Structures are given as structure tokens and as C-alpha cells.
Amino acid sequence: MTRIIALSDTHLDDEKLADAVVALAKKADIIIHCGDFVSARTYAALADLGRLEAVHGNSDCLELKRLLPERKVIEVDGIRIGLVHMASHGADLVGAEMMAREMNVQVLVFGHIHRPIIEKGRLLLVCPGSTTLPRMSAPSVAELVIEEEKIRGNIIPVGSPNCDYLKFAGKLGKAEEGREKR
């Protein structure tokens, strides 16, 4: 059995990885990161935890964009897994499925949308979400388990759900209340 922890969109500069993420990564045989580490320090911190397979994202520093490829294919226990940052722009996974076919993989792990998705059809499409800036979901990672040449996956929350838009809307409401009181 091979256990893979996949993450993306950590968007960390000087901050450290969440303890829950570190604990999961330490127990994994392979760590996959689908871009937007942001800093080389975050990349190094994950690489120190174990075997790291990664691609760069659109928000990564120049050093990481030079170091890491835009796309990557790895083979684990007979399963071809594709890694890319941007495969889809939203709930429509047609682009991700087409990219998986183009890369000739059985599994495509991608990021960018900050929302966890696992869709099993002819191919397995996985977006682990974001550990720091989730969109309408809890911070999360994906766990992939390969056993007897079959792969399964699930999403693991690593924090409480939050929505920056709702926080922003709340601040607007308080600002409006302040103006009405004047």
C-alpha cells in the first residue's frame, strides 16, 4: 500500500505549514504539491518531510518557477499520476479531463481553484483545495491510497471552514452601521 498526501495553494511566505498538514505529510510515502507554494521556504519545508513531487503555480516566486516544471507525470505502483497547477477554472472539469487525457494519466491532481474536488469517472480528477485560502470550504488536503493497482482518494479537512467573502461582507455591514450612527 502506498499513501500519498496531495496539497496545493498553500500560499505561504514566512508562515509555517499548519501542524495538521505536517503530521499528515510525515505519514505519507509521497507528498504531491500542485503549485502556489509562493516561497522557496515552503517548498523546502515540505521537501524536508519526505519524497516531494511538485509543479509550480502562477503565484510562485521566480526561483520556484525555474526549479519546478509546469506539468509532471509520475508513476506510482503502476498508476500514472499527472500534476499540474491550473487544469480547470471552476466546477466544470472538462478542461481537467482533457488535460488528463493529453498527459496520458489515470489520475490528474491539480490546484488553482482552492476548492476540494474528487471526481471518479474513467479518470480520477483530484483538487486538494487550499490549506490556507479555501474557497467556500474548509482548508484541506487530499489523500490518495494505492493498493493492488487500484487508487482511491478522499479529502481531509485540516481546519475549520471559512469564507473570506463573508468576513469582507461583515466588515462592510459594520462600516455601514457606523455611517448610519453619525
Image: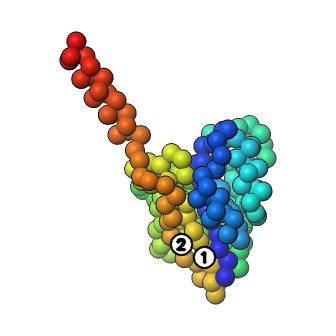
* Nearer-N-terminus badge (1/2): 1
In the image, residue 155 above or below residue 138 = below
Q: Is residue 18 left or right of residue 122?
A: right
Residue 173 in view of the camera: yes
Task: Check if mark 1's residue and mark 2's residue have beta carbons within 8 Å.
Answer: yes
Q: Which residue is mark 2?
A: 153
Farthest residue to the top: give it. 182
Farthest residue to the bottom: give it. 148
Rendered residue at 76%/63% (across/down): 50
Identify residue type, mark 1.
Answer: Val
Residue 88 in view of the camera: no
Q: Secondary structure at mark 1?
A: strand
Q: Which of 85/162 is in front?
A: 162
Identify the mark at residue 33; answer none if there is no mark: none
Residue 113, x across and y down, in percent: 49, 50
Which image quadrant: the N terminus?
bottom right
Farthest residue to the left: give it. 180
Q: How many marks?
A: 2
Q: Is residue 2 left or right of residue 167?
A: right
Identify residue type, mark 2.
Answer: Gly
Rendered residue at 60%/43% (across/down): 11
Q: Which of 3/67 is in front?
A: 3
Rendered residue at 71%/74% (across/down): 76
Q: Which residue is mark 1?
A: 145
